[in-house]
Image (spheres, rainbow, N blue to C red):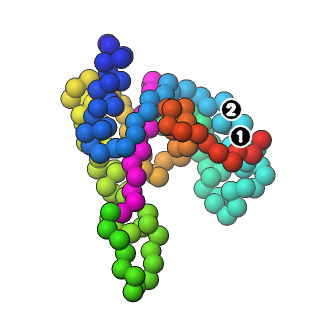
Amino acid sequence: MDLSKNNHFVKKAAESLGFDYCGIAKAGYMNEDARRLEKWLQNGYHGKMQYMENHFDLRTDPSKLVPGAKSVITLMQNYYPKQLQTTDGPKISKYAYGKDYHEIIRAKLNEFLALIRENIGEIAGRGFVDSAPVLERAWAAKSGLGWVGKTET
C-alpha cells in the first residue's frame, strides 16, 4: 500500500466534492486532550450540556468509534450561504440559513467514503457531522487544519 499515493488521492477526492480543506492524522488515544476535557468537565464549563459527560472514552479514542482506525480524516467546508437574506424579514443565523448543512455534508461524506473504497480498497470508515462524540477541533489541529484556541489548563 502506497501511503503517499493514498493520501494524495484522499485530498483530491475531498477537493473534487467541494470540501475546502482536508487533513489526515494518525489515529490514537488523545492523551493530552483527554486530560484537558476531563478538567473542563470537572470545572463545569459544559454548563447544561450534560451530553458532554457521556462517552468520554469515545471522544478520546477514535478506535472505539471505528475499530481498527489507523487515520482520522478531517474535512472542512464553509457553509456561509451565497444568497443574502432579505433586509425586511427576521434575521436567521448564517449556519441555519439555507439547506441544513448536516444533510448536505453527510451526503458528501458518504460519497467521499465510496470514492475511497472504489479507489483504495475496503475501509471501515464512518463520517460524522455533529453526530458523534468526536473532538472535531482537536482532530482538525492534529490534521494540520488550524489550532484550538481558548483552552483551559
What residue sits 40% from the left and 39% below the top?
21
- Name the residue located 25 percent from the left edge and 39 percent from the top edge: 16
Looking at the image, which is closer to me, 152 or 131? 152
Magenta region's main secondary structure? loop
Instruction: Please provide percent x and percent y for residue 64.
Output: 52, 34
Vertical order, 42 against 7 (above or below): below
The structure residue drawn at horizontal position 32% and vertical position 13%, both measured from the top left corner, is: 2
Question: What kind of element bears circle 2?
Answer: helix
Question: Is residue 22 part of the magenta span, yes or no?
Answer: no
Q: Residue furthest top?
A: 1
* Residue 38, horizontal then vertical, whole percent: 72, 43
Q: Is residue 62 visible?
A: no
**Mark 1 Cα-neighbour bin, 10 Å: few <14, some 14–19, many ≥20:** some
Q: Bounds of the magenta span?
A: 67-81
The CA span between labels 2 and 1 is 6 Å
Three-letter residue code for mark 2:
Glu
- Tags 2 and 1 in contact by the CB under 8 Å rule? yes
The residue identified by callout 1 is 36
Residue named by callout 2:
32
Q: Residue at x 34, y 44 (%)?
A: 19
